[in-house]
Image (cartoon, rainbow, N blue to C red):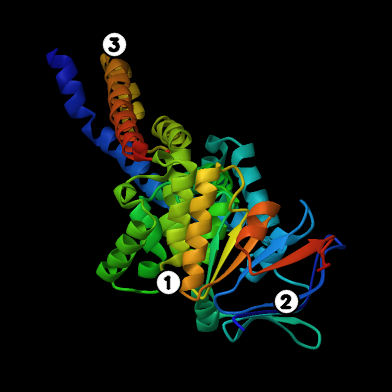
Amino acid sequence: MILNVEGLIKSFRGQKVLDKVSFELKEGEIVSIFGRSGAGKSTLLRCINGLETIDRGSIKINGEYLYRENENYIEIAKGESLKRIRQSIGYVFQNFNLFPNLTVLDNIILSPVKAYKLDKDIAIEKANNLLKKLNISDKRDCYPYELSGGQKQRVAIARACILSPKIICFDEPTSAVDDEVKRSIADIIMEFKRENIAVLIVSHDKDFSYSISDRIISIEEGKIIS
Amino acid sequence: MDYITNLFISMKSGMFVTFYIFSITLIFSLVLGIVVAILRLSKLKMVELVVSLYIFIMRGTPLLLQIIFVFFGLPIIGITFDRYTAVFIAFILNYAAYFAEIFRAGLQSIDKGQFEAAKVLGLSRFETYRYVIFPQMLKNILPALANEVITLVKDTALVYVVGISDILREGKIAVNRDATLLPFLVVAIFYAGFIYVLTNLFKNIEEKFEYYR
């Protein structure tokens, strides 16, 4: 298993948002977390990416614990272990969160070059390959404000992929996109599957989720119902 | 005309003093301002409280009074500074408080998603601020920063209170000596020229940041 979520509980101001959530993700598997707004699906994705702390339970990514429940406290991964975990998981935000002050290329290579000390030329070569694959090579030197929504999303995908993660998470990838962009996102996700990368999608788009997923996890009021 | 040229030459040291106080204050208060802004956003209540109190005192009382307090007030409890040190302490503490508020507003204007994106990409706190947050923050705060820096140029005139001979004080001496108001015109030209250079400098910096939106 590439991802194990076990007995995850998360509350905001005493209100349980996630209640004993457990599931697993295999290599190359596409899983959609489906549910209504406020069901807790985005919070779940944020917990898996270490953007929210958890109250109980554990999250294990690529064999290492991001959160691990001990007797009275939650142990959080630190230092090199946390870096390895972050390298194993990519996150494509709903609104992409590209850095507006950096070009497309710099957005993609910032993390590998600065955080992971990858040689800049190698990072650029990897980024160029990704941009080519995602059909946006001509936007390499553009700034995010010069891109359309679909192009921004591809840059965000390239940024999340540059370190060859084992899992890629998408938060509402089809919100506010037309059918053509939707189809191209589905193609990109299927390509990940072929490369044995697991994909975790949070969506309220039932058609999209059902059409590309191997498995659907339905979540309601913080609980997995099926 | 010769008289005005001679006045410019004779007030050279005053101009230097004004420029010197301005530069030292600017450099140190900017650095201290960043530190104070980060502390102001601290999750530790005590730190946030102390920093807020400091900012309130600095912004709530006149700079003139602060200079008087440091130079004339502190010796009462045995803490003595020379004129320049006293002036620098008061100016730097005062301006750092204003800059800190500008930086804080700038930091808070950055979308939370930028911090989160940097986090999931594995960037350290330093890398996040260095490559993502500060460049964006600087673009947002430049107009407010420019205003404050221009105010600082004019505030340097307050050093007269401890007897430091800046350009304005030298101008006053010349007015009394020569029984003409022309030295004040020279002083005004100096301040206006100085501010003109700074205004253009900030305009250029703002233009440099226009490469993205």
Residue at far right of view? A14
Q: Amino acid at mark 1?
A: Leu
Q: Position of residue B27 (x, y in %)?
A: 38, 49
Viewer can see residue A69: yes
- Pinpoint residue B147: horizontal percent, then vertical percent: 45, 31
Q: Earlier in the sequence, mark 1 or mark 2?
A: 2
Q: Secondary structure at mark 3?
A: loop
Tell whether A121 sits left or right of A146: left
State whether residue A25 is above or below residue B12.
below
Q: Which mark identifies residue A163?
A: 1
Q: Nearer the viewer, mark 2 or mark 3?
A: 2
Between the residue at mark 1 and the residue at mark 3, the CA separation in whole angstroms equals 74 Å
Is B70 left, or right, of B152 in this rendering?
right
Give the Cα distance between marks 1 and 2.
25 Å
Number of other residues with Cα within 10 Å of mark 2, as a class: few under 14, some 14 to 19, many 20 or more: few
Whether label 1 touches label 2, CB < 8 Å: no
Q: Are marks 1 and 2 on the same chain?
A: yes
Q: Secondary structure at mark 1?
A: loop
Spatial distance from mark 2 to mark 3, Cα to Cα?
88 Å
Residue beneath the point at 50% across and 47% down: A181
Pair 1/2: label in front: 2
Q: Which mark is residue B191?
A: none
Closer-to-camera residue (A149/B56): A149
Q: Chain of mark 1?
A: A
Residue under circle 2? A23
Viewer-side residue, B21 vs B38? B38
Residue B169 location, x and y as percent? 36, 28
The structure residue drawn at horizontal position 66% and vertical position 50%, both measured from the top left corner, is B52
Q: What is the three-letter code of the residue carrying label 3?
A: Thr
For disc 2, the chain is A
Residue under numbered circle 3: B180
